[in-house]
Structure formats: C-alpha cells, structure tokens
Amino acid sequence: MIKIKDIMNPEVIVMQENEQVSHARNLMLKHAFSRIVVYDGNENPVGMVTEKDLTRRMGGKGPAWRRRPIDKISISRVMSNNLVTIGPNNGIRDAVELMIKNGISSIPVVDEEGLAGIVTKTDVIKFYSEKLGGLWKVSDLMSSAVVTVSEKHSIGHVISTMEEKGIGKIIVVRNSEPLGIITPANISFANVEDHETGISVEKIYFIRKTEGKDKTNVRQVSMLTAGDIMTDNLVMVQSNEDAARAAEIMFEKEISGLPVVDDGDLVGIITKTDLIRGIQ
C-alpha cells in the first residue's frame, strides 16, 4: 500500500494565528504556495488559509472588519478552523476520502512529533498520472455541466457565480468557444492595468465592494472584467483521452482543471477533484 509519507511534501509554510492577512499574502507570493498552516501560541496547528479562503471571505458585503486594510485583519478571521489532519502511515485512499468528505484540497500530515508535512490534491494526481494509466477515460470522470461566463462579465459577477455554484474555477467563453479559465488565484492576485498605457500599476489581493468614505481601488476594480484576469493560454483535453494523461498535464502545468473539448465544442471540465474520485 502506498502511504501518505511516500507522496507528501515535507515543506510546509506556517504562520501564527495572531499575525495579519498581509503576512499571509507575502508568504504566498514569496514561496509560490497557495496554502498556509496556522499555529496557535502553543505551536499546535489550528487552521489553514488558502487562496480560496481569501477570495471568498474577504470579498463582498459583511462585517466592518472586512473593510480594514489587510495589515489590520488577523488571519484567524479568515482561516478555516476545525483542521483535518492525517498520519504519515495512512493510505492514499484515506486522504482522498477526507478531501472529498470535507471539501478540502490539502491535509496537514501530523506524527507524534508534530507537523511532518502536507498532502495535497496535486500530490495525489501526480501519483495518479504515474501509477493509474488506463483505469479511466476523461469522459468517465469529467463534469459535463460546465459553468461559464463571458469575457465581458465583471469580476463581481464572476465571484458571485463561483460562490452561488460552489465552484473553484470557471470557464470564460466567447460564442461558446473557450477562451480562458478563472480560479481563486486569478482573483486574489489580479494584475490591474492602466487602460491607457497597458502598464500594470498595482496588484489587488482581494476584491470587494466598498462603502462609505473608503473608496480605495474602486475605480480600478470596477473596470476589471473576466477577460482581464483570466488565464488565456488554455490547455484542453478530449473526452476519449486517458484520465491519467489529464492528471499528468495538470501536474506539469500546475493547473487544477482542464476544459474538455470535442470537435471544437466545450463538452465538459475535468478537475483534480474529479480525478481523485477515480482513486476511491
């Protein structure tokens, strides 16, 4: 049996629960990690913060603290609590079951000495691509109900659609032709360009509607559309391809979902979650 310790990443980025959202931002950018394990004052892992947490919990209307600068907001307000952990000697299927049951994409690995590493969906699909060729075709695991937006839709519409549908990625289309894909990373770290010069003038860590006197970033944010922030170098697969090939592409390209296209028509999407279901 392949164990968690055989596929986990021993490198984990951590921060204290009394530190600020701005520190999480800097860690993510510096280390190119999309998740951080949060410790309490006694060096116990108590939560996790991901790009998705920041996109969903910092956006939209809500409590007054959401309108503070990100160096004034404690990470404890936006992190996911009730941390799910796993042991290094558990099997891969144990991790898959926990990920699907809890709707999560990563699990800290804890042994008798404390935090030993982290296992993610990326680690699982790497295993899938190397060991499970021929098990399933893309059509067996893909989702045929694809949620799409137009390139002209606002970021606000994109965020609300993702929240309403409970999805982590959305396909951008023009006349039913796939043009790009948007994930929480596109939203959380959106490049804002001056529309006259085309020069990137600032980065936005989260996007929200502002009210009252604080109008920071309102002008730039209101001008952004799905087409401005999408990843446009789309990699696609066909429905009759081996699902292990889709896993290989996701791992190599560091992406979490692939549009499925047959004869130029968008027929589905396959994600890391779809793929790991094939391991259960």
Image: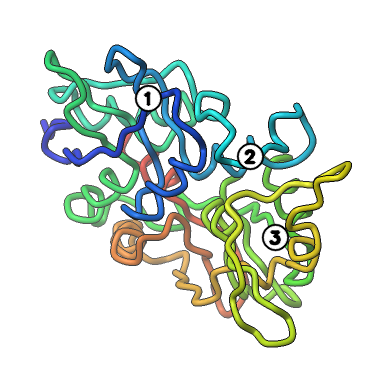
Residue marked by disc 2: 56
Question: Front-most of 2 and 39?
Answer: 39
What's the CA distance linking mark 2 and mark 3? 19 Å
Question: Which element carries disc 3, helix, strand or loop?
Answer: strand
Nearest to the eye among marks 1 and 2: give it: 2
- In this rendering, would 256 be left or right of 117? right
What's the CA distance linking mark 1 and mark 3? 29 Å
Q: Residue 184 in the image: x percent, y percent? A: 56, 51
Q: Amino acid at mark 2?
A: Arg
Q: Amino acid at mark 1?
A: Leu
The C terminus: image quadrant: top left
Q: Estimate how packed mark 1 is, as few (under 14), some (14 to 19) or many (20 or more) residues with alpha carbons within 10 Å.
A: some
Residue marked by disc 1: 98
* Image-quadrant location for residue 85: top left
Instruction: Point out which mark residue 223 bears.
Output: none
What's the CA distance linking mark 1 and mark 2? 22 Å
The N terminus: image quadrant: top left
Name the residue rendered at 45%, 45% in the picture: 274
Q: Residue 154 in the image: x percent, y percent? A: 78, 62
* Up-down relation of residue 20 to residue 191 (above or below): above
* Image-quadrant location for residue 84: top left
Residue marked by disc 3: 148
* Up-down relation of residue 12 to residue 65 (above or below): below
Q: Estimate how packed mark 3 is, as few (under 14), some (14 to 19) or many (20 or more) residues with alpha carbons within 10 Å.
A: many
Question: Front-most of 267 and 178?
Answer: 178
Sooner in the amino-acid sequence: mark 2 or mark 3: 2
Q: CB atoms at circles 1 and 2 under 8 Å apart?
A: no
* Up-down relation of residue 180 to residue 273 (above or below): below
